[in-house]
Structures are given as structure tokens and as C-alpha cells.
Amino acid sequence: LASAGTHGVTPRAHAMLSSASITPRAIGGRAHARATPVSSRVKFGLVTSTPQSRRRGVARAALGEDRTHGKKPASCVIVGGGPTGLACAIALARRGWTNVQVWERLLRPPASDSKEWGDPSRSYNVGLSGRGQSVLRDIGALDTVLDKCAVVKGRMDWGPDGEPKERLANKTYDTQVIQRDRLVACLLEEVEDKYSDAIKVKYNACCTGCEFAEDGSNVTLELGECGEECDVFDPDAVGGKFTVPVVFGAEGNSMRSAVVREMDENPKCQVKVVRYSSNNARVYKTIPIYLPDNMRKDLNYSARTKGGVALECLPTKEGLLIGIMLVKPDDEATCETLTNPTSLKAFFKEEFPMFNGFIKEKDIEAMANSKFFGLPNFGYVANGLNMGGMAALLGDTIHTVKPYFGLGVNSAWEDVRILIDALDDADGDTAVALPKYSKNRAKDAEALVTLSRSFDGGFLTFVLPLIVDSIFNKIAPWLFMPNTIQMLQKEDWSFKDIQRRKWLDRFMQGAVISSALAAFTAGVVNVARQFVIPFTMKLLARGGV
């Protein structure tokens, strides 16, 4: 899980909650592990867990190549300057695109090496899996980002009974954790160091209007100032108008995006935004935790209470552990407890004794006085992701998931990869490439959200399938695949392929269980016919004696 800061996450970080991906729960150990240099941790473009490990997956050389599109448009705008938008801009610049403007409605983050990142309030962490790391490698930004990451190699988990459990991760890569805005700062520095002649990033710049030309030749965008607390529906925010051949919408999961809104409402566009109401809502507060030197700093520490309150903690590059406490909003008693410094201190002492002595009094008070924040609801874009050759959507805009299993920013960067593949095949002709991108990615986006929603249920829809998958995979690994969470970490599998494969597993599991039950029932009937029924008949014939 991602973590945020002690005084509540900054407005900038919280405004982009849905754009962040929170790392998979890592798996723990005891001794402190000394960090190894970046160069020794990079193998075949991924950060590997062992020197012998190899990156699994299909060949993905295209994104890593520098090409020049012969039919590229004269200019474009990317609405959204987060990890998705900046990665897209870099990828386009590497294909010879120029006059690429990136509009970001929030303010510019501090430099990636700023001391401000030691402030817990700026520590909204995202986890970079193999999917995300491979894209960073291919756009040439992996080393820059890794230099500001903390490695998460394992998990230490305390269940409701208070007993700790340790497991070591067994993956071809190490999960890398970085503050969301710090990740943006790293990509921005890549833009300014290498692509400043092709990419211009505008901050405090909000797209407040979008209109597509009837002939499909261009799109007119309205630009207005925004700032931290802006209301994009305020007509006073509307500024100048810009006409460009193509726009890419990468502004997260909010319908505040004028591009998303216009595509959703335009009768000539197939795009339809699907949003789900939450049936398993959680709100959270955050707090920094100062681990002693004898505890390793490369773990995801996790603890849960019998009442269903969870505390998930991830490290930062600076060594600080950031905890995010998740609670049900309708649990009024616990929510009230978390708003009073005295009761909150007692709550930590009673429910999370494993962290006693590692939390400062001032942070307890700051957490109690901070407000609760919510998690994004699930949603996706149905039917299509483009408007002719004039617009395409990518990132959390097309697949919004709750930040539990590292599926946000990593899947968004895969959108960039698939978009560039389509543009490569069309030599940059957006009229050809954007419909192809939509065809190749729309079903994947829906599958990702569908799979993720299954994790948000209770025992029957989440825990039981994981148990069943693990049992069958252990018995017959040559026939049954690992559980869905493990499958999602396989960067060589598309989300649609994972969904189809799990459907097949469920069918085969059902067939095996049904056959076993049928055999058991037949055995019981056979025993009854051979022994129970004759014995009963004889007993009755003797008058029951």
C-alpha cells in the first residue's frame, strides 16, 4: 500500500490520489539489508532480486528504440502532467515529435533531490513493479527514478491475533517505492535535461474546455489557471484557446477533465465512462514511524486489528516509514477515536503494540487533528478510448482502481507502451494509430478494473478464490495458474489474458470439485446399498431387535 504523510498529504498529492499506484504488499524478513548500487541492481532493464534472475516476458524492444515518425502531427497537447502524461511526452519526443505541450493543473513539485522529501507530509508513496520498471527502462528514465527509490524486498505481517509472519519475496525484480510527486519531479528533470526543445510543461494550467472539429482535423482546447484549490467549472477560470491536431487525456480518474467530459458526452464519440459506487469503502489517516537501526527498512510492515482496522507502512529513500491507517467510514467509534490525541495514543498502544516507541507524540497529535481521506472508486472507459485521430485517453482516466496491488501507475505506463506501438505501426498517423490503440487497450482496461473489483469484496469473492487457486496450483502447477494477485505481477501477461485464464481455471476447478463431490456421493450411495440398507432391512425383519 502507498503511504502518505503525517499532517495529511499535501493538497497536491491528495488531488492526484487516483493517479497513484500503491505497491503490492511486499514480503518480509528480519535483518537490515544494505542497499546495493543502482548499477549492480539493474539487469536486462529491471531491478532484479538475484544476479541469476532474468526478466520474463515477451520482447518489448519497440518503446526503447529511438525513431522518427514521418506522419506525426505538427503539435499536440497532453492534458495531465503526472507520471502518465510525462512518460507519454518523453516517449513521443523520442519518436521525433515536437511542439508537445503538457498541461498540469497543479503546481510544480520540488526538485527530486530537495530536502522537502524528508517531510512525511510529502510522502504519498507509489510502488513500481516489473510492468512499470520496464517502461522506465525503455524511455531511458529508469536510473534517474531508481536513485530516489526505496527498495521493498519483503513483508512483515501481524494478523488480528498479534502474531507476526515473515515471508520473502520471490520475484524477478524488487518493488521500488517512491513518493508520487518525487516521481513526477524525476520525469520532469528528464524532460528538461533531454527533451526541452520538444516538450514544454505548463503548471497551474487547467484544460477547462474541449471542442472537436466537425471534419476531424483538430481539437480546440481552452486553457485557464487553476492552482491547488481551483474549480475547473468556474467560467472565470477559462483563458486562451489553442487549436492542435491531437490531444491526449491523462488527467486521472476525475470527470473534471474537459477532454474526458467532452468525449463522454459527444454523440459522435464511442467513449462512455463507467463509474462504480463503493461497496467496501475505506478512509485513512497517515503517520510517520521511526524504526530503530536493528529493524530493516526495506519491508512492507502490515498489521490488522480484530475490528478490521489496517495499518500499512512503506519506507522512503530517507529511511522514514510511513503508515497509512485504513478504517471503515461507518465505524463511527473508531473514527472518533482517531480524532482525539489521547484516545489515538491509547489505540496505538492497545491495537498496534509492535510499533510502540517508534511513533512521536507530535505525530500522534498531528494525525488526530488531520482529516480523513478517501480512496478512489472503481471505474473504466467503455466502448473506445479515442475520438478519431484527434484524441486518446490513457492512465487512470481509462482504468481507475483502488491502490492496493500496484496496478495504477504501472498499468498507466503500459498504456503509453501500447499507444507508442500503435503510432509506430502507423508511422505517427494518429487517424490510423488512435483507433488501433483503442482496439488493443480498451478491453484490457475493463479487465483490469473487473479483476481489481473482485479483490474489494469479502471472503467469497476475494479470500476463498485465493485459497482455492493456491491449493490447485500447488497440487498441479502444470495445469493451474497461480492466484490472480500473482498473475497480475507477470508483466508478459495482458490483463485480458489473465482474466480469460482465470475463467478457465475456475471452470476446471469447478469440474474437479464437482467430480470429486459426485464420486464421494456415489461412494456414499454404494456403501448404503451394500451395507446400510441390507442391515436396516434385516433389523426391521427381526422386529427392530
Image: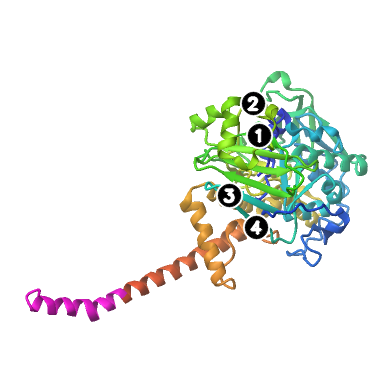
Q: Is the magenta stretch mostly helix, strand or loop?
A: helix
Identify residue for label 1: 286
Indicate which disc, 3 or 2, sits on the residue closer to the N terminus.
2
Indicate which disc, 4 or 3, sits on the residue closer to the N terminus.
4
Indicate which disc, 4 or 1, sits on the residue closer to the N terminus.
4
Image spot of residue 56 (x, y percent): 73, 65
Identify the disc placed on residue 452: 3
| Residue at 59% across, 71% down | 477
Determine crowd level at label 1: few under 14, some 14-19, many 20+ residues with C-alpha closer than 10 A: many
Name the residue type under label 4: Arg
Image spot of residue 396 (x, y percent): 67, 42
| Residue at 53% across, 38% down | 281
Identify residue for label 4: 167
Magenta part of the chain:
524-545
Indicate which disc, 1 or 2, sits on the residue closer to the N terminus.
1
Name the residue type under label 3: Ser
| Cβ–Cβ under 8 Å for marks 1 and 2 | yes
Q: What is the spatial separation of the Cα atoms under label 3 and label 1, in whole angstroms?
A: 24 Å
Q: What is the spatial separation of the Cα atoms under label 3 and label 2, in whole angstroms?
A: 29 Å
Q: Quadrant of the N terminus?
A: top right
| Residue at 49% across, 68% down | 508
Secondary structure beneath label 4: strand
| Cβ–Cβ under 8 Å for marks 3 and 2 | no
Residue 54 belongs to magenta span: no
Q: What is the spatial separation of the Cα atoms under label 4 and label 2, in whole angstroms?
A: 34 Å
Identify residue for label 2: 370
Whether residue 423 can be seen here = no
Determine crowd level at label 3: few under 14, some 14-19, many 20+ residues with C-alpha closer than 10 A: many
Image spot of residue 462 (x, y percent): 51, 52
